Image (cartoon, helix red, strand yellow):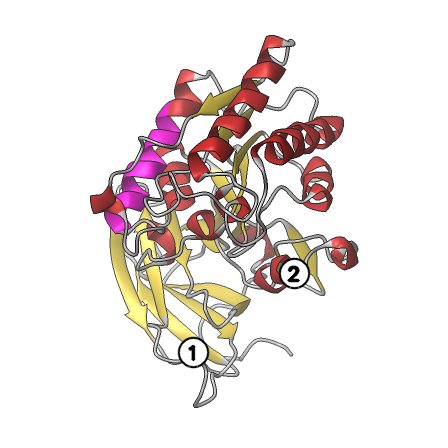
Amino acid sequence: MRPLSGAEDPWQDPGPFLRGVAWLDGGRPVRADPADTMRLPWDTGERATLPIGVRLEFTAGTARAVEIHYRATVPGPTDALRDLAHGFALWNRHGRLDEVYTEPAAESVVRIGLPPRHGPFTVHPPESQGPLILGLRGIGGSLSPAPAAPRWVVHGDSITEGWWSTRPAHGWPAVTGRALGWDTVNLGYAGAARGELATAEQLAGLPADVLTLAFGTNCWSRVPHSAPLLYETTRAFLDLLRQGHPRTPVLLVSPVLRPDAERTPNKLGATLGALRDAMERAVRDRTAAGDSFLALLPGRDLLGPEHLADGLHPNDSGHQVLGLAVATALRRSGFDGT
Protein backbone atom coordinates (compact mmCIF):
# COMPACT_ATOMS: atom_id res chain seq x y z
CA MET A 1 0.00 0.00 0.00
CA ARG A 2 1.32 3.45 -0.88
CA PRO A 3 1.74 6.02 1.90
CA LEU A 4 -1.11 8.40 2.52
CA SER A 5 -1.04 11.52 0.36
CA GLY A 6 -1.07 15.07 1.69
CA ALA A 7 -0.18 18.66 1.04
CA GLU A 8 3.08 18.52 3.01
CA ASP A 9 6.45 17.31 1.72
CA PRO A 10 6.40 13.84 0.14
CA TRP A 11 6.80 10.74 2.24
CA GLN A 12 10.29 9.31 2.48
CA ASP A 13 11.22 5.65 2.36
CA PRO A 14 11.79 4.56 5.98
CA GLY A 15 14.52 2.07 5.05
CA PRO A 16 17.52 4.43 5.32
CA PHE A 17 16.22 5.74 8.68
CA LEU A 18 15.65 2.38 10.36
CA ARG A 19 18.14 1.16 12.95
CA GLY A 20 18.30 -2.05 14.95
CA VAL A 21 17.37 -4.16 11.92
CA ALA A 22 18.75 -7.70 11.76
CA TRP A 23 16.80 -9.22 8.86
CA LEU A 24 13.91 -8.21 6.61
CA ASP A 25 11.06 -10.52 5.66
CA GLY A 26 9.01 -9.01 2.85
CA GLY A 27 10.07 -5.55 3.97
CA ARG A 28 9.18 -6.15 7.63
CA PRO A 29 12.02 -6.19 10.18
CA VAL A 30 12.33 -9.55 11.93
CA ARG A 31 14.81 -10.84 14.49
CA ALA A 32 15.64 -14.28 13.09
CA ASP A 33 16.74 -15.33 9.63
CA PRO A 34 13.50 -15.86 7.66
CA ALA A 35 15.29 -18.41 5.49
CA ASP A 36 16.23 -20.53 8.52
CA THR A 37 13.20 -20.55 10.82
CA MET A 38 12.56 -24.29 10.71
CA ARG A 39 15.60 -25.04 12.86
CA LEU A 40 14.60 -22.63 15.61
CA PRO A 41 12.45 -23.53 18.64
CA TRP A 42 8.87 -22.35 18.38
CA ASP A 43 9.24 -19.80 21.19
CA THR A 44 12.28 -18.21 19.54
CA GLY A 45 10.47 -17.94 16.22
CA GLU A 46 7.44 -16.35 17.84
CA ARG A 47 9.43 -13.67 19.67
CA ALA A 48 11.51 -12.96 16.57
CA THR A 49 8.46 -11.56 14.78
CA LEU A 50 8.29 -8.59 17.19
CA PRO A 51 10.37 -5.53 16.15
CA ILE A 52 12.14 -5.21 19.51
CA GLY A 53 14.71 -2.44 19.36
CA VAL A 54 13.83 -1.32 15.82
CA ARG A 55 13.68 2.47 15.68
CA LEU A 56 14.03 5.54 13.44
CA GLU A 57 17.10 7.79 13.66
CA PHE A 58 17.42 11.08 11.79
CA THR A 59 18.63 14.66 11.70
CA ALA A 60 15.99 17.29 11.14
CA GLY A 61 17.48 20.55 9.88
CA THR A 62 14.72 23.15 10.06
CA ALA A 63 11.88 20.64 10.47
CA ARG A 64 9.59 21.48 13.37
CA ALA A 65 7.90 18.06 13.45
CA VAL A 66 8.10 14.55 12.03
CA GLU A 67 5.15 12.56 10.76
CA ILE A 68 5.31 8.76 10.77
CA HIS A 69 2.97 6.69 8.63
CA TYR A 70 2.53 3.22 10.12
CA ARG A 71 0.45 0.09 10.15
CA ALA A 72 -0.11 -1.91 13.37
CA THR A 73 -2.10 -4.89 14.55
CA VAL A 74 -5.37 -3.87 16.17
CA PRO A 75 -5.71 -5.95 19.37
CA GLY A 76 -8.86 -7.94 19.94
CA PRO A 77 -10.94 -7.74 23.12
CA THR A 78 -9.10 -10.69 24.70
CA ASP A 79 -5.58 -9.68 23.61
CA ALA A 80 -3.29 -9.82 26.67
CA LEU A 81 -1.37 -6.79 25.36
CA ARG A 82 -4.47 -4.73 24.66
CA ASP A 83 -3.95 -2.24 27.50
CA LEU A 84 -0.26 -1.51 26.88
CA ALA A 85 0.50 2.10 26.04
CA HIS A 86 0.88 2.71 22.31
CA GLY A 87 3.37 5.53 22.40
CA PHE A 88 5.97 6.89 19.98
CA ALA A 89 8.87 8.24 22.08
CA LEU A 90 11.30 10.89 20.83
CA TRP A 91 14.83 10.68 22.26
CA ASN A 92 18.30 11.98 21.75
CA ARG A 93 21.44 10.65 23.43
CA HIS A 94 20.75 12.71 26.54
CA GLY A 95 17.22 11.53 27.27
CA ARG A 96 13.58 11.51 26.31
CA LEU A 97 12.25 14.66 24.66
CA ASP A 98 8.59 13.78 24.07
CA GLU A 99 6.14 10.91 23.74
CA VAL A 100 2.96 10.87 21.67
CA TYR A 101 0.28 8.29 22.39
CA THR A 102 -2.01 6.90 19.69
CA GLU A 103 -4.21 3.85 19.23
CA PRO A 104 -3.12 0.77 17.27
CA ALA A 105 -4.58 1.13 13.80
CA ALA A 106 -4.59 -0.78 10.56
CA GLU A 107 -3.10 2.40 9.06
CA SER A 108 -2.49 5.80 10.62
CA VAL A 109 -0.13 8.76 10.95
CA VAL A 110 1.41 10.17 14.13
CA ARG A 111 3.00 13.62 14.39
CA ILE A 112 5.79 14.40 16.90
CA GLY A 113 7.09 17.90 17.48
CA LEU A 114 10.84 18.45 17.22
CA PRO A 115 12.83 20.90 19.34
CA PRO A 116 15.38 22.98 17.45
CA ARG A 117 19.05 21.98 17.37
CA HIS A 118 18.81 18.93 19.60
CA GLY A 119 19.37 16.10 17.13
CA PRO A 120 20.19 13.57 15.96
CA PHE A 121 16.82 12.20 17.02
CA THR A 122 15.60 8.68 17.71
CA VAL A 123 11.96 7.62 17.62
CA HIS A 124 11.17 4.41 19.48
CA PRO A 125 7.85 3.06 18.18
CA PRO A 126 5.64 0.91 20.41
CA GLU A 127 6.61 -2.74 20.08
CA SER A 128 3.68 -4.79 21.36
CA GLN A 129 1.49 -4.54 18.25
CA GLY A 130 4.35 -4.95 15.79
CA PRO A 131 4.04 -1.60 13.97
CA LEU A 132 5.36 -1.50 10.42
CA ILE A 133 6.75 1.92 9.42
CA LEU A 134 5.52 2.81 5.93
CA GLY A 135 7.01 6.27 5.57
CA LEU A 136 8.11 9.42 7.35
CA ARG A 137 8.45 13.10 6.49
CA GLY A 138 9.56 16.35 8.02
CA ILE A 139 7.14 19.20 8.60
CA GLY A 140 8.77 22.54 7.84
CA GLY A 141 12.01 21.01 6.61
CA SER A 142 13.61 17.84 5.35
CA LEU A 143 14.84 14.82 7.28
CA SER A 144 18.11 12.99 6.73
CA PRO A 145 19.16 9.59 8.06
CA ALA A 146 21.41 9.80 11.11
CA PRO A 147 25.08 9.01 10.50
CA ALA A 148 26.02 5.34 10.56
CA ALA A 149 27.23 4.01 13.90
CA PRO A 150 29.05 0.84 14.99
CA ARG A 151 26.68 -2.10 14.79
CA TRP A 152 26.29 -3.90 18.14
CA VAL A 153 24.39 -7.22 18.07
CA VAL A 154 23.20 -8.45 21.47
CA HIS A 155 21.61 -11.87 22.04
CA GLY A 156 19.82 -12.97 25.18
CA ASP A 157 16.52 -13.87 26.81
CA SER A 158 13.56 -11.87 28.15
CA ILE A 159 15.88 -9.64 30.20
CA THR A 160 17.65 -8.63 26.99
CA GLU A 161 14.32 -8.29 25.19
CA GLY A 162 13.47 -5.71 27.83
CA TRP A 163 10.74 -7.30 29.93
CA TRP A 164 9.45 -5.16 32.80
CA SER A 165 11.05 -2.03 31.40
CA THR A 166 8.25 0.48 31.03
CA ARG A 167 9.31 1.71 27.57
CA PRO A 168 11.34 0.26 24.67
CA ALA A 169 14.03 2.88 25.28
CA HIS A 170 14.46 1.76 28.90
CA GLY A 171 15.62 -1.82 28.24
CA TRP A 172 19.27 -2.39 29.07
CA PRO A 173 20.48 -2.90 25.44
CA ALA A 174 18.93 0.48 24.53
CA VAL A 175 20.67 2.04 27.55
CA THR A 176 24.03 0.58 26.52
CA GLY A 177 23.68 1.57 22.88
CA ARG A 178 22.71 5.12 23.79
CA ALA A 179 25.68 5.44 26.17
CA LEU A 180 28.11 4.27 23.50
CA GLY A 181 26.46 5.86 20.47
CA TRP A 182 26.09 2.46 18.79
CA ASP A 183 23.43 0.90 16.56
CA THR A 184 21.90 -1.69 18.88
CA VAL A 185 20.42 -4.81 17.25
CA ASN A 186 18.35 -6.55 19.94
CA LEU A 187 18.08 -10.32 19.49
CA GLY A 188 16.61 -11.04 22.91
CA TYR A 189 14.01 -13.82 22.87
CA ALA A 190 11.74 -14.07 25.90
CA GLY A 191 11.50 -17.64 27.20
CA ALA A 192 14.25 -18.82 24.88
CA ALA A 193 17.98 -18.04 24.48
CA ARG A 194 19.21 -21.37 25.87
CA GLY A 195 22.34 -21.59 23.77
CA GLU A 196 20.55 -22.87 20.65
CA LEU A 197 23.24 -23.69 18.11
CA ALA A 198 21.04 -22.68 15.19
CA THR A 199 20.95 -19.20 16.69
CA ALA A 200 24.75 -19.21 16.97
CA GLU A 201 24.98 -19.98 13.25
CA GLN A 202 22.54 -17.18 12.43
CA LEU A 203 24.60 -14.75 14.50
CA ALA A 204 27.72 -15.95 12.70
CA GLY A 205 26.22 -14.83 9.40
CA LEU A 206 24.96 -11.46 10.64
CA PRO A 207 27.09 -8.32 10.14
CA ALA A 208 28.34 -6.98 13.49
CA ASP A 209 31.13 -4.75 14.75
CA VAL A 210 30.69 -6.01 18.34
CA LEU A 211 28.61 -8.86 19.80
CA THR A 212 27.28 -9.49 23.30
CA LEU A 213 25.79 -12.75 24.61
CA ALA A 214 23.59 -12.66 27.72
CA PHE A 215 21.78 -15.98 28.00
CA GLY A 216 21.67 -18.75 30.62
CA THR A 217 18.78 -18.02 32.99
CA ASN A 218 16.34 -20.14 31.00
CA CYS A 219 18.83 -23.01 31.13
CA TRP A 220 17.99 -23.33 34.83
CA SER A 221 14.23 -23.79 34.52
CA ARG A 222 12.54 -23.64 31.13
CA VAL A 223 14.82 -26.24 29.50
CA PRO A 224 16.96 -27.54 32.38
CA HIS A 225 20.66 -27.94 31.81
CA SER A 226 23.31 -29.50 33.98
CA ALA A 227 26.49 -27.54 34.60
CA PRO A 228 28.59 -29.78 32.32
CA LEU A 229 25.97 -29.49 29.57
CA LEU A 230 25.92 -25.69 29.75
CA TYR A 231 29.72 -25.56 29.78
CA GLU A 232 29.87 -27.56 26.53
CA THR A 233 26.92 -25.64 25.06
CA THR A 234 28.69 -22.33 25.70
CA ARG A 235 31.89 -23.62 24.12
CA ALA A 236 30.00 -24.91 21.08
CA PHE A 237 28.03 -21.67 20.74
CA LEU A 238 31.25 -19.66 20.73
CA ASP A 239 32.91 -22.07 18.30
CA LEU A 240 30.08 -21.62 15.79
CA LEU A 241 29.96 -17.86 16.33
CA ARG A 242 33.68 -17.59 15.66
CA GLN A 243 33.27 -19.30 12.27
CA GLY A 244 31.59 -16.13 11.02
CA HIS A 245 33.23 -13.63 13.38
CA PRO A 246 36.79 -14.83 13.95
CA ARG A 247 38.04 -11.44 15.18
CA THR A 248 34.85 -9.62 16.13
CA PRO A 249 34.88 -8.51 19.79
CA VAL A 250 32.48 -10.62 21.90
CA LEU A 251 31.40 -9.90 25.47
CA LEU A 252 29.58 -12.64 27.38
CA VAL A 253 27.44 -11.50 30.32
CA SER A 254 26.66 -14.40 32.62
CA PRO A 255 23.20 -14.59 34.28
CA VAL A 256 22.27 -11.79 36.63
CA LEU A 257 20.85 -12.34 40.10
CA ARG A 258 17.80 -14.60 40.38
CA PRO A 259 17.22 -15.16 44.12
CA ASP A 260 14.91 -18.17 43.83
CA ALA A 261 17.39 -20.04 41.62
CA GLU A 262 20.80 -19.21 43.03
CA ARG A 263 20.96 -22.20 45.41
CA THR A 264 17.97 -24.22 44.25
CA PRO A 265 18.74 -27.29 42.12
CA ASN A 266 16.81 -27.70 38.89
CA LYS A 267 15.59 -31.04 37.53
CA LEU A 268 19.16 -31.98 36.60
CA GLY A 269 20.56 -30.93 39.96
CA ALA A 270 22.14 -27.64 38.86
CA THR A 271 21.69 -24.37 40.73
CA LEU A 272 21.81 -21.13 38.76
CA GLY A 273 25.06 -20.40 40.59
CA ALA A 274 26.57 -23.61 39.21
CA LEU A 275 25.31 -22.84 35.69
CA ARG A 276 26.76 -19.34 35.88
CA ASP A 277 30.10 -20.75 36.97
CA ALA A 278 30.05 -23.19 34.03
CA MET A 279 29.46 -20.42 31.50
CA GLU A 280 32.17 -18.23 33.00
CA ARG A 281 34.63 -21.12 33.05
CA ALA A 282 33.92 -21.80 29.36
CA VAL A 283 34.80 -18.20 28.52
CA ARG A 284 37.94 -18.18 30.67
CA ASP A 285 39.12 -21.45 29.13
CA ARG A 286 38.67 -20.04 25.65
CA THR A 287 40.48 -16.80 26.42
CA ALA A 288 43.32 -18.79 28.03
CA ALA A 289 43.53 -20.77 24.79
CA GLY A 290 44.16 -17.57 22.85
CA ASP A 291 40.86 -15.87 21.99
CA SER A 292 41.92 -12.29 22.66
CA PHE A 293 38.68 -10.87 21.25
CA LEU A 294 36.50 -12.47 23.93
CA ALA A 295 35.68 -10.89 27.30
CA LEU A 296 33.56 -11.82 30.30
CA LEU A 297 31.28 -9.74 32.51
CA PRO A 298 30.20 -11.82 35.54
CA GLY A 299 26.51 -11.09 36.10
CA ARG A 300 25.90 -12.23 39.68
CA ASP A 301 26.67 -8.96 41.45
CA LEU A 302 25.54 -6.46 38.82
CA LEU A 303 22.02 -6.18 40.28
CA GLY A 304 20.55 -6.39 43.77
CA PRO A 305 17.06 -7.53 44.84
CA GLU A 306 15.92 -3.89 44.75
CA HIS A 307 16.57 -3.85 40.98
CA LEU A 308 14.20 -6.75 40.24
CA ALA A 309 10.55 -6.13 39.39
CA ASP A 310 9.40 -9.70 39.91
CA GLY A 311 12.39 -11.55 41.33
CA LEU A 312 13.71 -12.23 37.83
CA HIS A 313 13.37 -9.28 35.43
CA PRO A 314 14.93 -5.89 36.16
CA ASN A 315 12.77 -2.84 36.73
CA ASP A 316 13.67 0.40 34.93
CA SER A 317 16.35 1.14 37.52
CA GLY A 318 17.79 -2.34 37.09
CA HIS A 319 17.85 -2.04 33.31
CA GLN A 320 19.67 1.28 33.67
CA VAL A 321 22.26 -0.19 36.03
CA LEU A 322 22.77 -3.26 33.86
CA GLY A 323 23.01 -1.25 30.64
CA LEU A 324 25.65 1.10 32.03
CA ALA A 325 27.61 -1.83 33.49
CA VAL A 326 27.72 -3.47 30.06
CA ALA A 327 28.80 -0.19 28.46
CA THR A 328 31.61 0.12 31.00
CA ALA A 329 32.71 -3.48 30.42
CA LEU A 330 32.80 -2.95 26.65
CA ARG A 331 34.90 0.20 27.04
CA ARG A 332 37.31 -1.44 29.49
CA SER A 333 37.74 -4.40 27.15
CA GLY A 334 38.80 -2.01 24.41
CA PHE A 335 35.82 -2.92 22.25
CA ASP A 336 35.21 0.43 20.59
CA GLY A 337 33.10 -0.85 17.71
CA THR A 338 35.54 0.12 14.97
| Crowd class of label 2 (few under 14; some 14 to 19; many from 20; radius 10 Å) | many
Residue 118 visible in the snapshot:
no
Amino acid type at circle 1 is Ala
* Residue 175 place in picture, x, y as percent: 35, 42
Residue 99 lies in quadrant: bottom left
* Residue 225 place in picture, x, y as percent: 59, 42
* Residue 280 place in picture, x, y as percent: 51, 24
| Disc ID at residue 45 | 2
Which stretch did the figure color magenta? 316-328
Residue found 28% across the figure and 49% down from its top:
308
* Residue 34 place in picture, x, y as percent: 74, 58
| Disc ID at residue 316 | none
Residue 323 counted in the magenta span: yes
Residue 179 lies in quadrant: top left
Q: Which residue is mark 1?
A: 80
Would residue 172 appear left or right of 49 to someone viewing this image?
Answer: left
The N terminus: image quadrant: bottom right
CA gap between label 2 and label 1 equals 19 Å
